[in-house]
Amino acid sequence: MNFIKTPIEGLYIIEPRIFNDKRGYFFESFSQREFDENIRPIKFVQDNESMSTYGVMRGLHYQRMPYTQSKLVRCTRGRVLDVAVDIRHGSPTFGQHVAVELSEENKRQFFIPRGFAHGFSVLSEEAIFQYKCDNYYAPQSEGGISLLDNTLGIDWQIPSDRAILSEKDLVHKLLAETPHDFNYSDNLYA
């Protein structure tokens, strides 16, 4: 696997080594040893999957302490634009984001550590999205930032008249209006 650092510390794009032949292809989608050596030791405890259609936008979600989560995400069918926003107050990259296209063709994965809000938009007719989490989902600790926060500068690549958002995602506040749930100096992995 190729572990690619992004401009924001802690965010990684992971590209697998794909072996093609006349039968099809093979690749290793996760190796605990390689992940621990190249990013950091982690223990994933929950896998999730969603299916969405073109124009669906999900996010920008996170979980508050003590249930905050790191995620390893990928798109196994179709194409999504995946986005992580640094919400660690005091971070030199606070409010900045990294966007990466994940697809069944490129087989890329995106690692999003604790202290980031996460979301994606579906660019294909349909997409199946999978992610591993290092903490269990806890509905009482849900947090979110508006996908429509223009101060973040995210181009979701979906025309506004085609965007499909849940009622829950429509009521998230702007980043400037959200509580200080994470600080850059916090040890989020304790």
Image (cartoon, grey):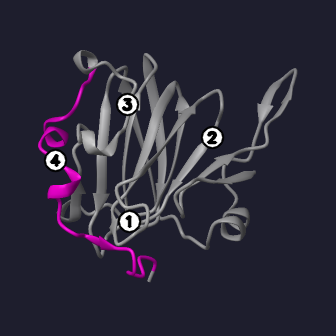
How many residues crowd mark 3 within 10 Å: few (<14), some (14–19), many (20+)?
many
Residue 121 sits above or below residue 187 on the image: above
Q: Amino acid at mark 3?
A: Trp
Closest to the camera, between mark 2 and mark 4, is: 4
Q: Amino acid at mark 1?
A: Gly
- Residue 130 position in % (x across, y down): 48, 43
- Residue 2 position in % (x across, y down): 74, 50
Q: Is residue 180 magenta?
A: yes
- Residue 164 position in % (x across, y down): 24, 25
Q: Label 3, on which residue?
A: 156
Q: Residue furthest right?
A: 21
Residue beneath the point at 73% across and 47% down: 28
Secondary structure found at label 4: loop
Q: Label 4, on which residue?
A: 172
Left or right, 66 with respect to 7, comes to left
Residue beneath the point at 31% across and 32% down: 57
